Amino acid sequence: MVESVGSGRGESNLKRKALHELRRFMAMFLYLWVLFGVFEVYRSMILAESHVNYQAQGFAAINALMLAKVMLLGEELHLGRQIKGRSLLFLVLYQSLIFTILFICFHLAEKGLVGVLHGKPMSEWYPEMGGGSLKAILSAGAVIFVALIPFFAFKDITRVIGVQAMRTIIFSRGLIDEASSLAEPSPDY
């Protein structure tokens, strides 16, 4: 009897942990999917100006799924969390940089693996990566870096003030009016 109660608690904790990880994964996936989806729409508009038919919205979802898993794994390995005693701004920028580098490395490894699996020598698949140039890879990295800043800022502020406080701030009616009545007016805004 004691054994079944213990295993029930273990199952309950396991289910709770699995649900928590699924929620984290889905938040990452949705953020990345929107990011990559918008990026693909922009890319198709630019290429349409040159009369190139480009439709890769499906790749946005696939890339978001893969990179959300990479991001979840990176967080489990505490990437970007090694620094203590720094400002929240520094931590957010540092995490954005670390995960941008992780995404670029994953992208390069993925392209290389696909090239190898298709039996192509490196000279054929290497130029395809990132648009074929270091400049294109760094440009995509800059876009990803900037796009990850709000993600990590939101996540880290939530970690500091708590989930309930963040929900209250975001979803409560009249909270902005109430908070602004308590704050000193700023001539800058």
Image (cartoon, grey):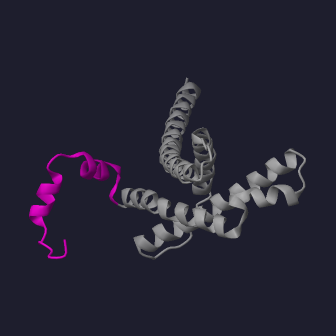
- Assign the C terminus to one quadrant of the image: bottom left
Is residue 81 visible from the viewing direction of this image?
no
Residue 98 quadrant: bottom right
Residue 104 as seen in the image, left or right of residue 24: right
Vertical relation: 152 (above or below) 86: above
> For this rendering, which residue is in front, 97 or 40?
40
Residue 24: percent from left, percent from top: 50, 45
Residue 70: percent from left, percent from top: 63, 51
Vertical relation: 19 (above or below) 51: above
Residue 51: percent from left, percent from top: 60, 48
Name the main secondary structure of what is drawn in magenta.
helix
Is residue 110 within the magenta segment? no
Q: Which residues are magenta?
A: 161-189
Residue 62: percent from left, percent from top: 62, 41
Q: Residue at horizontal 46%, vertical 60%?
A: 152
Q: Residue at horizontal 61%, vertical 43%?
A: 53
Q: Residue at horizontal 90%, vertical 55%?
A: 121
